[in-house]
Amino acid sequence: MSRAIGLICCNYLSGSLQEVAKDRPVGAVPFGGRYRLLDFVLSSMVNSGIRTVGLITPPNYRPLVDHLGAGKEWFLDRKAGGLFLLPGANQGLNDKDIKFSLPDLRANLEFLEKDFAEQVIMSGCNQVFNINFRKALEFQNNIAADAVLLYQAIPDRPANPGEHILDAARDGRVKKILTAGSAVAEEQPKRPKKRGKLFLDILLLRRKLLMEIISKSNVKTADLLGVIGENLNSLKVYAYPHAGYWARIESVAGYFRHNLELLDPKIRTELFMGKDRIMTKIKDNPPARYGFAAQVKDSLVASGCYIEGRVEKSVIFREVQIKMGAQIKNAVVMQRCTIGKDVVLENVILDKFVRIKDQTVLKGTENCPVVLSKGSVV
């Protein structure tokens, strides 16, 4: 069992997810046929031996409570430790996209004070990954670091605006934390792309140091990462690499693309078929059924579905009904949608309980998929 606790920050908006996150927190956004985005970080923490996890919730937290319950599926329904739903602070208009919000942490200082753990793993909830944090925790202890920031090399693309880039020495000590698209970042000399270290919104901190930062920080200060960045000379902050799959969900196009990436067997195997499993809420559905005319190719189809039409390169969630003659291609279809006869869907995202009437045609593009909100009838 780890001597660390987990703290997941969910009280923030995520870019431009639009209809996908309209009526739900970003952590409750469905993903991959049967999961919620929160499942990935929560499962990773539990698989790392963490038995106490705090979840800072936004005002519209009902979908999170409905999904998590008492934390039974993650073995967090326990007397010692367990899952704690913590209230988020009221954010200002300019602070709604800050993951590691000091007002949130200040409102839940008691959660940290009551525990005796030495380390705290903090993370956002809009990432897709399967990471065992044991080695990172060991790394922090071995070098006696105050903080460790997980990163991934980004050789194949420039950083997107708002992403954080770590400028680290050869020994891994962080010298600067740059925000892509900011004036400070633009003033930095251009470096080879292979040296780019993208911060993964996951950090390890000493619990007592975190409490000290919360207590001493200015009331107007909003961002924990900003405080760490301003004190790199006095704090021992190190970067730690993650070489596996990792994706941040912050736009409709990104949500669509990363869902369809699960059709790649290598990515699917890394996320779901290893020793550390991604856990989620259990639903007792029968296996998917297929009509005599059904054609399914290169797709993920969850339990409880009834497929009579044609499905290609799509992710189909639980209890979806696709009727005779329907043609579905490059689509993400969430739970309990009904797709009528002779419907044509291509490059679309259907939220839960959407009903598509017979002979309807909806086509988007890979970069701009058509999105129908929860309960829509078209």
Image (cartoon, grey):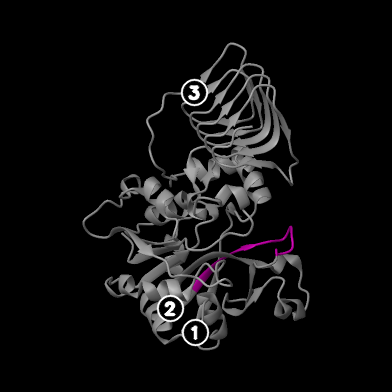
Labels 2, 1: front one: 1
Q: Is residue 159 magenta?
A: yes
Secondary structure under tag 3 reads loop
Secondary structure under tag 2 reads loop
Report the residue that reaches farthest toward the top.
292
Q: Earlier in the sequence, mark 2 or mark 1?
A: 2
Secondary structure under tag 1 reads loop
Q: For mark 1, what is the residue?
A: 235
Q: Residue 92, percent across and down?
A: 53, 73
Q: For mark 2, what is the residue?
A: 144
Name the amino acid type tagged 3.
Answer: Ala
Label 3 environment density (alpha carbons within 10 Å; few <14, some 14–19, many ≥20)? some
**Marks 2/1: CA–CA distance:** 11 Å
**Marks 3/1: CA–CA distance:** 54 Å
Q: Which residues are magenta?
A: 148-160
* Near-viewer residue (229 or 267): 229
Q: Residue at x 76, y 69 (%)?
A: 192
Q: For mark 3, what is the residue?
A: 288
